[in-house]
Image (tube, grey):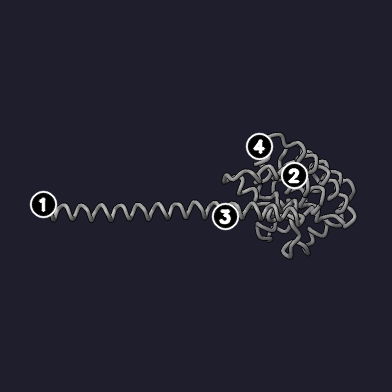
Amino acid sequence: MNQNYPPKVRSMLERLALIKTDLSGVTMSVSLDRNFKDLPETNEILSSITSEDKNRLLMALEQAFANKDLTRVIALYSYIVLFQETDQTNIKQEVIRYFLLYIKEQKNDAELNAMFLHPGFPGLVSGLNDRELTDLQFKLFSRYLDDKTAIGTRIVGVQKNLPLSEDQKKEVLNYLDEIKAEKEKVENKRNRNRSIIIIVLVVTLFIIRMVLRTRS
């Protein structure tokens, strides 16, 4: 590798090269943007990609899903850019299958919250853009539609960024409208209470002044 490359470029090339050796330590995503795509090292990697590399990636992805490690899943899935279109389609189909199993295995609120609130979750679901996958995660998400707590609201907010059906979008929007109405109701009540307090204080001060005047 050319040591004159900036550290950012060298780091990316090192991560890209892991597709040929060992993906077990991958925790950061890769890309082929204009800063890296036309470099000799990148072209060398791209020209050497084989079915063995695809199998290595799929095994790593399956293990990351089994470990419920979405951070690694997202980092590993980014390596799909190194493959030809046919292999990309195959990798995507396998990731969807792994993801469906992963979602079905979420057993409790803590695991569900962690999944829905993972910063990479909406990007991964949107990128895969699979109807069965989106519907399944929405089915689990629906339990939050009766949850008006802060965490429920955050999770509902995530859904706005997913490729939902029209009916699903309506459910999300209705929830957000209800939250907005409740907040406005609380704010109006707070304002009324504040006004009452001010009035009571003014009247009290007025009475005190009148009493003091009378005594003087």
| SS for callout 1 | helix
The alpha-carbon separation of the residues under discs 4 and 2 comes to 14 Å
Name the outermost residue toward the top: 107
Instruction: Inspect the image, locate mark 2, and give the three-letter code of the amino acid beneath it.
Output: Lys
Name the outermost residue toward the front: 214
| SS for callout 3 | helix
The answer to which of 119 and 161 lies nearer the viewer is 161
* Numbered tag placed on residue 119 in the rendering: none
Classed neighbour count for the residue bearing mark 1: other residues with Cα under 10 Å, few (<14), some (14–19), many (≥20) = few
The image quadrant where one finds the N terminus is bottom right
Residue annotated with mark 4: 109
Mark 4–mark 1 CB contact (< 8 Å): no
Mark 2–mark 3 CB contact (< 8 Å): no
Q: Nearer the viewer, mark 4 or mark 1?
A: 1
The answer to which of 179 and 96 lies nearer the viewer is 179
Q: Residue at x 90, y 48 (%)?
A: 51
Name the outermost residue toward the left: 216
Q: Residue at x 80, y 45 (%)?
A: 21
Residue annotated with mark 1: 215
Instruction: Inspect the image, locate mark 3, and give the three-letter code of the amino acid beneath it.
Output: Lys
Residue annotated with mark 3: 180
- Of the two numbered discs 2 and 1 on the same chain, state the one appearing first in sequence: 2
- Of the two numbered discs 4 and 3 on the same chain, state the one appearing first in sequence: 4
| SS for callout 2 | helix
- Of the two numbered discs 3 and 1 on the same chain, state the one appearing first in sequence: 3
Instruction: Inspect the image, locate mark 1, and give the three-letter code of the amino acid beneath it.
Output: Arg
Residue annotated with mark 2: 139
Q: Nearer the viewer, mark 2 or mark 1?
A: 1
Q: Nearer the viewer, mark 2 or mark 3?
A: 3
Residue 106's x, y, as percent? Answer: 72, 37
The answer to which of 206 and 141 lies nearer the viewer is 206
